[in-house]
Amino acid sequence: MALIEDTVASGAKFLVKGDIPDGPGYFVHPAVVDNPADDSDIVRLEPFGPVVPLLRFHDIDEVVERANASEYGLGGSVWSGDPAAAERIAARIETGVVWTNEGPRLAPDLPFGGHKTSGLGVENGTAVLLEYTDTQVLWSRTA
């Protein structure tokens, strides 16, 4: 709610504004913010909720540059009518996971972890097992 309140205070336009429904529980209706400033909290932070900015862009290089300018990099998604183009763009995004033409999906046999300041360590897959091991290197001179 603080993120929504900050966005309202900034004067940004909502296409859909998230409200708290009556009743028990911790629920917020989805909110979509129309083209907020790149330095606004809704763009800079990881909201982890149904609050998203809808940003305009001129070309793919701009999209990649703006996405990678974030200090965070947990996950992202690329949507396109051209699946091959979506995969090329996804490969340029600096996040632990990038989904193309679908929302977040995880699998127990694939590692999940963030880049930059997102996340701590890795979950799932053999990568997580390596976190419970201690690597040791032995050097020996034989002659």
Image: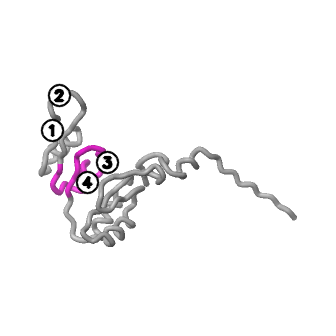
- Separation of marks 4 and 3 at Cα, in angstroms: 13 Å
Kind of residue indicated by mark 2? Gly
Task: Check the picture and name the quadrant holding the C terminus.
Answer: bottom right
- Separation of marks 1 and 2 at Cα, in angstroms: 12 Å
- Separation of marks 4 and 2 at Cα, in angstroms: 34 Å
Q: Is residue 83 left or right of residue 118?
A: left
Mark earlier in primary sequence (3, 2) = 2
Q: Are marks 1 and 2 in contact (CB under 8 Å)?
A: no
Residue 39, disc? 4
Nearer mark to the viewer, of 1 and 3 = 1
Kind of residue indicated by mark 1? Asp
The crowd level at tag 2 (other Cα within 10 Å; few <14, some 14-19, many 20+) is few
- Residue 44: x and y in percent read 29, 51
Q: Are marks 3 and 2 in contact (CB under 8 Å)?
A: no
9, 123: nearer the viewer: 123
- Residue 21: x and y in percent read 15, 34
62, 78: nearer the viewer: 78
- Identified at 28% across, 70% down, the residue is 60
Task: Check the picture and name the quadrant holding the N terminus.
Answer: top left
Q: Is residue 41 magenta?
A: yes
Residue 46, disc? 3
Q: Is residue 40 visible?
A: yes
Residue under numbered circle 1: 19
- Identified at 18% across, 46% down, the residue is 31
Kind of residue indicated by mark 3? Glu
Local secondary structure at mark 4: loop
Q: Is residue 2 left or right of residue 143?
A: left
- Separation of marks 1 and 3 at Cα, in angstroms: 19 Å
Residue under numbered circle 2: 23
